[in-house]
Image (spheres, rainbow, N blue to C red):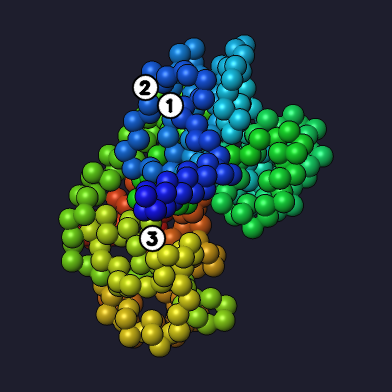
């Protein structure tokens, strides 16, 4: 009898703890509506799109945030789950602080949806974005951490698109939402596959009712990847890095999307276990001695001049770090640089992989994202 009572008390305790303070988990829209179908996503894991009757679309992000696009002229559904943010279409006058998303809007030919930028005109390496700001079609509204709230409200902004950097300025997100401006955090940087980042064009395609254009643009990048031969190895080793102003080497973490691009292009990144996989940082700072020992015999060097500013010659590179003259890639003339457009052109990642493959196989001609140092 005592054992039975003890068991009852244990069950009651578990039930009381489980039911205390636990939020109710909603599925779908929370009002009984069922999706007709979902978007086909191949590489991305940080978003999904479900379609409903009447043109409604539920966008769910990797952090759990959810947005429902409301077709123009339609009403917000009744009994909508409280965590879902309704976005009335057309979605326009966007404040774009997520720099890497600009090229996705550009690829959709929908820069007209963006009215405000978190990057000044001279910070853009996307020609159409720079031109739009020079014409005044897109206005500067302060960087992500110091937005111009007055201009954002004055321009009728209906959505702020932020990068994950907003996590360092959460008070800005709170203030925008307090002012009635919904915030969508672009989480493409969390995608592990390079084309997962490019595939975010499908999310913005859904937001702007441009799914067909998005699919066409993404298919082009997929074809570049296929032409690069997948992960068929060329046997070539590659060092990807830049030298900081303090003389340290800054290299990409093993397993990040850049090292994955090298692998997909048929190369082998020289660092196998560089950096903590549990940390969100994408680069690791190492001393030249350690770098020298690991990368001296690499077949190719790709110098990350997108961070430091483009350099024009091998002599200039050796002025930055004279020890590089001992490197196999330098002696064999296999030193390449990234263009400064590399990190802004998320929609070009498939093409970047193909260009890397051409570099590693000795078939490279004029490239869009890399150039050879002479």
- What crowding class fits label 1: few (fewer than 14 Cα within 10 Å), some (14-19), or many (20 or more)? some
Q: Secondary structure at mark 3?
A: loop
- What crowding class fits label 3: few (fewer than 14 Cα within 10 Å), some (14-19), or many (20 or more)? many
Question: Image check: 316 left or right of 328?
Answer: right
Q: Residue at x 42, y 65 (%)?
A: 278
Residue 11: give its label: none
Of pointers 3 and 2, the one earlier in the residue sequence: 2
Of pointers 3 and 1, the one earlier in the residue sequence: 1
Query: Which residue is at the front of the view, 165 or 294?
Result: 165
Q: Which quarter of the figure has residue 152? A: top right
The residue pinned by badge 3 equals 256
The residue pinned by badge 2 equals 37
Between the C-alphas of marks 3 and 2, the distance is 32 Å
Image coordinates for residue 138, horizontal then vertical, percent: 68, 37
Query: Which residue is at the front of the view, 38 or 361?
Result: 38
Q: Is residue 191 visible?
A: no
| Residues under numbered marks 2 and 1 in contact, where contact means CB atoms less than 8 Å apart | yes
Residue 50: give its label: 1
Image coordinates for residue 320, horizontal then vertical, percent: 50, 80
């Amino acid at each position: 009898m005592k054992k039975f009572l003890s068991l009852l008390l244990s069950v009651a305790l578990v039930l009381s703890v489980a039911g205390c303070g636990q939020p109710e988990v909603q599925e779908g829209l929370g009002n009984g509506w069922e999706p007709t179908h979902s978007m086909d996503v191949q590489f991305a894991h940080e978003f999904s799109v479900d379609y409903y009757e009447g043109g409604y679309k539920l966008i769910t992000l990797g952090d759990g945030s959810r947005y429902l696009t409301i077709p123009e002229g339609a009403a917000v559904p009744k009994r909508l789950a409280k965590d879902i943010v309704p976005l009335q279409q057309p979605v326009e006058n966007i404040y774009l602080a997520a720099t890497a998303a600009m090229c996705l809007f550009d690829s959709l030919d929908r820069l007209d949806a963006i009215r405000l930028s978190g990057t000044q005109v001279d910070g853009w390496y996307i020609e159409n974005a720079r031109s739009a700001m020079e014409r005044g079609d897109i206005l500067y509204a302060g960087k992500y951490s110091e937005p111009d709230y007055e201009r954002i409200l004055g321009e009728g902004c209906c959505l702020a698109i932020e990068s994950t950097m907003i996590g360092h300025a959460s008070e800005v997100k709170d203030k925008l939402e307090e002012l009635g401006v919904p915030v969508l955090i672009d989480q493409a940087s969390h995608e592990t596959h390079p084309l997962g980042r490019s595939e975010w064009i499908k999310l913005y395609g859904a937001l702007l009712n441009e799914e067909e254009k998005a699919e066409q643009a993404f298919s082009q990048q997929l074809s570049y990847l296929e032409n690069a031969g997948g992960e068929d190895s060329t046997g070539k080793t590659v060092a990807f890095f830049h030298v900081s102003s303090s003389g340290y080497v800054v290299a990409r973490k093993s397993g990040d999307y850049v090292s994955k691009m090298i692998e997909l292009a048929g190369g082998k990144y020289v660092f196998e276990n560089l950096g903590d996989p549990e940390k969100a940082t994408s680069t690791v700072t190492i001393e030249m001695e350690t770098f020298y020992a690991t990368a001296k015999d690499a077949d190719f060097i790709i110098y990350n001049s997108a961070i430091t500013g483009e350099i024009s010659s091998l002599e200039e590179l050796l002025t930055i770090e004279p020890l590089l003259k001992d490197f196999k890639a330098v002696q064999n003339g296999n030193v390449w640089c990234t263009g400064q457009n590399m990190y802004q052109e998320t929609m070009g990642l498939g093409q970047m992989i193909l260009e890397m493959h051409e570099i590693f196989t000795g078939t490279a001609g004029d490239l869009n994202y890399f150039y050879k140092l002479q």
